[in-house]
């Protein structure tokens, strides 16, 4: 039977995990299920040494001491020293730390001191921001409901009474009462139930509420033709059990607690969430760039030493210069810039959009996402149905069907005195309140009928009946029945062929992703006696009311924005394939060929990696399927994000490069996630992705500018060392130059990249960086070599002061070219837009002023620099103009090639 033919409130779960709840007497030694029947309620109560009247207060206190509180094991807060040491494992920080140690070994104490300070600052920034995120996440635990209605006795002869107790005080054997809206506080076995349906979406991902009833009622169910649909295999399909993490949708029940605290299924998922995450996109990018830097650094000092020894006969006296060259190649501010940019982005997200980034590198991963996986319920659709159409027996639109369905829903709700309406009844009444449409014939209001009696819905009959009297027809009662297609059709006066035709029509509608309610009526002579389910016979079939999932209002626009940003959205759901495909079509997404869990099981990891990239919708997914799909997408080279809020999402949250959940997610999902949203909304994800791309753009800008500039300087230093009879720059001058450049680059942490930087996924790709820094580094080296010619020409008439003037001239040119590079090579800006933000303009202006005037101050001679003739500044201006033009043309060509790559 198609799942969408289920009656109002009956619900149906999708495929579930194969683990089994260790109910008393049900689990075998091997962890599976014995072929014997599950234990009855009486057997469960006996095994727990309890009874229908609950525990004595003294027994409950003794069990609380023995079993402990009904809470999940608290995660220990990470102490500050451990956070600080963990930050040292960052590859960028490790490279810088090694440089500081090498500098200390060769006696370059100034360089060693500067690098050590930068390492400490970077680690402190990262530790502080992650500590702040942990505190914000811990505060979310206060939002969880904390009480339950528990039945206990004060003595053996006293009456049992229910009272509200903190859920932490529940113990195995406690008898609790469940009502609509209650969270199930522990794993329980049902003793009694009346129309009880439970949302298990946090555990299974299934959006439809699941009918629950005691084991004893299942014998009745088995004797009823066309009974409840099979709920599938697995622990959560046990209809006599409710689990911590689920919530009551409708009805009421009484249950005995069978597991609390760390013994619940919820806690099992919580413990599994503690496993370590795999390598993220940030880790992979950082490792690749770090190894590129390490290779350059290890290669540079030997080259400098060998070249000077071979061509100039210099020995180990050039070692400090060689180390200074290696340090000059390294972006010393990288750990500080990375941490500051990510911390600033995380702070802005928390302040402006209430988004918590628990792990700072996850902000980069957000910016790098090119595939976003999510569940359907709560993200694309709301957790409620809406009426799509009302169809007559021939399949044509017929508003009369909706009219009678609304009459059934209204008067069943009124007469049965139900605490809350069923979600499907609410949808029917909302649709009727909106009106049948302008072209429909006028129909009487459903409030005009006189209510006589009601037979409310129950999960065995799978239908409900309202008995009403039409205005002015006192001698006639009208029975209006609404419910599951099979249950209603078998009570209608139909020929077998007609019944089969109507069943096929219902199946076609269900296959299109719709849920169906069948509606029928009959007239009977008025009577005073009570109506029973036996009167639900020989009905006249009226038609179907079809329902679909209510779409999230912002989902369509948000999907369009994500797609324009280069992000492919994948829907991973436990729902029926037709339901998921219908929701996608309604939102303007092409679902393509839906891949179901059974088909996934038949695919190898390699084939799934190829198919996953081309598939949009994956249906009937268990937690293991979701994690496997995410792994396949990552294996095919995608940077993958996963949005989930339930226990069933925890494995996929861990498998993704970045796990995302809303603040009202279950505890285990919040623990597993890297990013916590204010609400489960695609718009909030877009804000987070935009912030991640801006932070990543800042980091990429810094790396490209610094590495290309540094590479050009190193090439020029090596060439000058071979051409000149003296060192082209003294170690102290290299250190001061690097300090000035590094201080100016702090402005990047406060820079805002241009709009093009957020238009596509931002990934730090080592090969892309290598191409960029090689091309622009050679351009920078050409400017340096041209400056050598300018210096030779300008200093031709003053050879006595040549060495100090050369140092001064090159120092000035280096800082001025670096200031130009900072302005013209910013990520996401065209050359015309490259003037930079306020902090960046101030920083580059300050860098230029230091470059021009420092050699002229009293510090100049102390650093081995001398005065320069006016001719040099005129020639240098010409070189810088040509250099700026070359940067602009190279940048334009690079962006064009990158756009069409």
Image (tube, grey):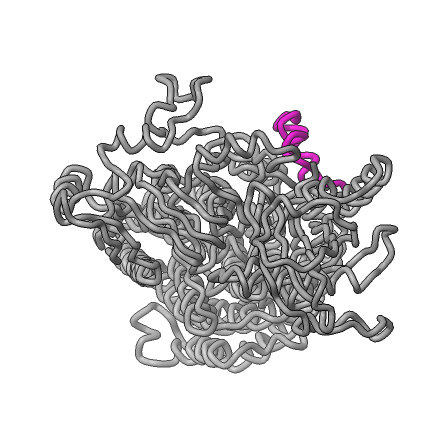
* Residue 301 in which image quadrant: top left
Query: Is residue 208 within the magenta segment?
Result: no
Tell how many labels: 0
Residue drawn at point x = 38 percent, y = 17 percent: 30
Q: Position of residue 162 (x, y in %)?
A: 26, 54
Q: Is residue 608 magenta?
A: yes
Question: Residue 810: where, in percent of width, then height?
Answer: 48, 67
Instruction: Classify 384 as above or below 243.
Output: below
- Give above or below for 559 relative to 580: below
Task: State left or right for residue 533 relative to residue 674.
Answer: right
Q: Is residue 811 left or right of residue 683?
A: left
| The N terminus lies in quadrant | top right
How far across and down, in percent of the image, does residue 206 sit? 56, 45
Name the residue rendered at 77%, 70% in the picture: 436
Q: Is residue 49 above or below residue 386?
A: above
Relative to 13, does residue 38 appear above or below in the rendering?
A: above
Q: Is residue 4 visible?
A: no
Left or right, 393 with reference to 164: right
Q: Residue at x 73, y 53 (%)?
A: 519
User: Residue 769: where, in percent of width, then height?
Assistant: 58, 51
Secondary structure, magenta segment, majority class? helix
Taking the image as drawn, is residue 631 in sight?
yes
The segment highlighted magenta reads 593-612
**Quarter residue 550 falls in:** bottom right
Q: Nearer the viewer, residue 321 or 765?
A: 765
């Amino acid at each position: 039977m198609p799942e969408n033919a289920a009656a109002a409130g009956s619900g149906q779960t999708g495929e579930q995990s194969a683990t089994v709840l260790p109910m008393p007497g049900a689990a075998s030694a091997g962890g599976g299920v014995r072929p014997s029947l599950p234990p009855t309620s009486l057997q469960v109560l006996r095994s727990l040494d309890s009874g229908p009247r609950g525990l004595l207060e003294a027994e409950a206190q003794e069990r609380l001491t023995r079993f402990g509180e009904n809470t999940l094991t608290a995660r220990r807060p990470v102490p500050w020293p451990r956070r600080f040491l963990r930050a040292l494992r960052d590859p960028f920080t490790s490279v810088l730390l090694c440089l500081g140690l090498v500098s200390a070994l060769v006696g370059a104490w100034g360089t060693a001191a500067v690098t050590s300070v930068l390492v400490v600052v970077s680690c402190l920034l990262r530790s502080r921001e992650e500590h702040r995120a942990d505190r914000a996440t811990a505060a979310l635990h206060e939002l969880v409901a904390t009480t339950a209605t528990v039945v206990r006795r004060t003595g053996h002869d006293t009456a049992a009474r229910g009272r509200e107790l903190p859920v932490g005080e529940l113990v195995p054997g406690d008898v609790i009462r469940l009502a609509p809206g209650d969270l199930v506080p522990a794993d329980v076995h049902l003793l009694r139930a009346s129309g009880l349906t439970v949302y298990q979406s946090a555990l299974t991902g299934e959006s439809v509420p699941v009918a629950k009833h005691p084991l004893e009622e299942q014998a009745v169910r088995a004797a009823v033709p066309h009974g409840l649909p099979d709920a599938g295999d697995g622990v959560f399909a046990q209809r006599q059990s409710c689990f911590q993490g689920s919530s009551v949708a409708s009805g009421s029940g009484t249950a005995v607690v069978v597991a609390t605290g760390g013994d619940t299924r919820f806690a099992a998922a919580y413990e599994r969430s503690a496993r370590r995450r795999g390598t993220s996109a940030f880790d992979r990018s950082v490792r690749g760039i770090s190894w590129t830097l390490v290779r350059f650094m290890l290669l540079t000092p030997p080259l400098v030493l060998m070249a000077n020894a071979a061509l100039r006969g210099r020995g180990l006296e050039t070692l400090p210069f060689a180390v200074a060259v290696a340090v000059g190649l390294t972006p010393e501010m990288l750990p500080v810039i990375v941490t500051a940019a990510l911390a600033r982005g995380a702070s802005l997200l928390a302040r402006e959009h209430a988004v918590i980034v628990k792990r700072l590198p996850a902000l980069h991963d957000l910016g790098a996402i090119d595939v976003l996986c999510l569940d359907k319920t709560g993200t694309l659709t709301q957790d409620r149905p809406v009426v799509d159409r009302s169809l007559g027996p021939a399949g044509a639109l017929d508003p009369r069907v909706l009219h009678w369905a609304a009459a059934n829903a209204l008067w069943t709700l009124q007469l049965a005195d139900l605490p809350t309406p069923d979600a499907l009844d609410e949808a029917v009444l909302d649709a009727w309140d909106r009106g049948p449409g302008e072209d429909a014939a006028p129909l009487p209001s459903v409030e005009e009928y006189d209510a006589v009696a009601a037979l409310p819905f129950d999960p065995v009959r799978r239908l409900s009946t309202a008995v009403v009297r039409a205005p002015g027809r006192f001698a006639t009662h009208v029975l209006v029945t609404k419910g599951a297609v099979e249950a209603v059709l078998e009570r209608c006066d139909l020929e077998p062929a007609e019944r089969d035709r109507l069943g096929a029509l219902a199946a076609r509608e269900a296959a299109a992703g719709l849920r169906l309610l069948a509606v029928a009526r009959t007239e009977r002579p008025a009577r005073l006696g009570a109506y029973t389910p036996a009167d639900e016979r020989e009905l006249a079939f009226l038609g179907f009311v079809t329902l679909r999932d209510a779409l999230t209002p912002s989902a369509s626009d948000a999907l369009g924005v994500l797609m324009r940003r280069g992000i492919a959205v994948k829907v991973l759901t436990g729902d029926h394939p037709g339901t998921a495909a219908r929701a996608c079509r309604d939102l303007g997404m092409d679902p393509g060929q839906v891949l179901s869990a059974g088909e996934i099981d038949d695919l190898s990891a390699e084939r799934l990696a190829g198919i996953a990239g081309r598939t949009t919708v994956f249906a009937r997914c268990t937690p293991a399927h979701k994690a496997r799909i995410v792994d396949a997408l990552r294996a095919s080279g995608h940077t993958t994000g996963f949005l989930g809020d339930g226990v069933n999402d925890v494995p996929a949250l861990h498998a993704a490069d970045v796990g995302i959940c809303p603040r009202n997610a279950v505890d285990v999902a919040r623990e597993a996630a890297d990013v916590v949203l204010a609400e489960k909304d695609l718009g909030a994800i877009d804000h987070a992705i935009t912030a991640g791309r801006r932070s990543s753009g800042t980091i990429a800008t810094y790396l490209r500018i610094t590495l290309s500039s540094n590479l050009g300087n190193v090439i020029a230093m090596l060439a000058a060392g071979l051409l000149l009879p003296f060192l082209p720059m003294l170690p102290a001058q290299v250190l001061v130059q690097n300090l000035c450049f590094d201080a100016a680059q702090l402005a990047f942490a406060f820079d805002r990249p241009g709009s093009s930087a957020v238009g596509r996924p931002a990934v730090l790709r080592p090969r892309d960086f290598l191409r960029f820094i090689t091309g622009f580094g050679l351009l920078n080296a050409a400017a340096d070599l041209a400056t050598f010619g300018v210096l030779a020409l300008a200093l031709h008439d003053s050879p006595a002061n040549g060495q100090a003037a050369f140092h001064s001239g090159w120092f000035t040119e280096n800082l001025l070219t670096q200031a130009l590079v900072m302005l013209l090579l910013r990520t996401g800006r065209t050359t015309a837009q490259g003037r930079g933000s306020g902090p960046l303009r101030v920083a580059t202006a300050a860098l230029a002023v230091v470059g021009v005037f420092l050699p002229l101050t009293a510090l100049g001679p102390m650093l081995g620099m001398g005065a320069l003739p006016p001719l040099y500044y005129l020639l240098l201006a010409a070189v810088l103009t040509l250099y700026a033009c070359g940067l602009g043309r190279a940048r334009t060509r690079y962006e064009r090639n990158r756009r069409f790559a």
